[in-house]
Amino acid sequence: MESAFFDLINQFGYFGVWFLIFFENVFPPIPSELILPLSGFFTTSTSLTLPGVIIAATVGSVTGAFILYGVGRLLSRERLMTFFGTRPMRLLGFKPDDIASAVDWFDRKGQVTVLICRCIPIVRSLISIPAGTAKMGVVRFSLYTLVGSAVWNTILCSLGAAAGSAWETVTAQAEWVSDIVKYVIIALVVVAIAFWTVKRIIPALKERRSE
């Protein structure tokens, strides 16, 4: 993967940076922690400039984010409420009102998470989906995504440029942080599943048996 990224940026320059970050935003498992420091390194060995690389990466982030934002728009509140109102979902403790409450909360207080999450590994791309589902305003979504992405891209590209040929050390450190975030997310998911099982699934199953 690293050699493919290297060849793409080396051959296509700014367009290669844009394409890789665009792709990374649509398919989050692709690591920006590798692409951005590598892009920064290229500013020390080619005609690419640091501002140009940061701009290309940020444009890639914003355009890629709109793909998942569009997916979120397709997963409208009404469609999700209908889905979570089906019998299998009710047996898992879900209620249509849960979706309505979650979307309303995001609309009232959660929109700033788009800005914050753009600087957090793993969730930086996925946050675009709930933003679309909540029908967050396009202008605000664009602004928050632009600012958050610019901060993230500037930091990693600049560190890669500063490290030069040792840019892989930046990637290693960024991936270490990313791994920590993954473990925290996994732990939170496990706790959430345990809580949901006790509070929702078990009561729903008992209610079903008593019918």
Image (spheres, rainbow, N blue to C red):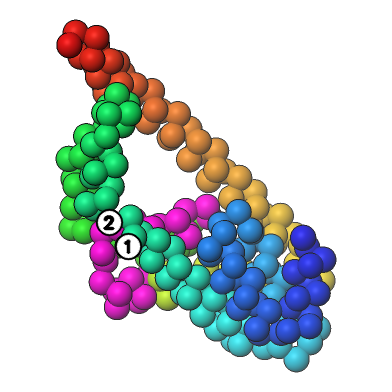
Viewer-nearest residue: 101 or 37: 101
Indicate the amino acid at tag 2: Ser
Q: Is residue 166 visible?
A: no
Secondary-structure class at tag 1: helix
The quarter of the image holding the N terminus is bottom right
Q: Which residue is mark 1?
A: 73
Q: Residue at x 67, y 67 (%)?
A: 35
**Residue 76 point in image, percent of width and height:** 27, 56
Determine which quarter of the picture holds residue 18.
bottom right
The total of numbered circles placed on residues is 2
- Does 128 appear in magenta? yes
Q: Residue 145: where, in percent of width, then height?
A: 40, 71
Tag 2 and tag 1, C-beta contact below 8 Å: yes
Read off the magenta span: 121-144
* x then y, percent, for residue 94: 26, 32
Label 2 neighbourhood size at 10 Å, few (<14), some (14-19), many (20+)?
some
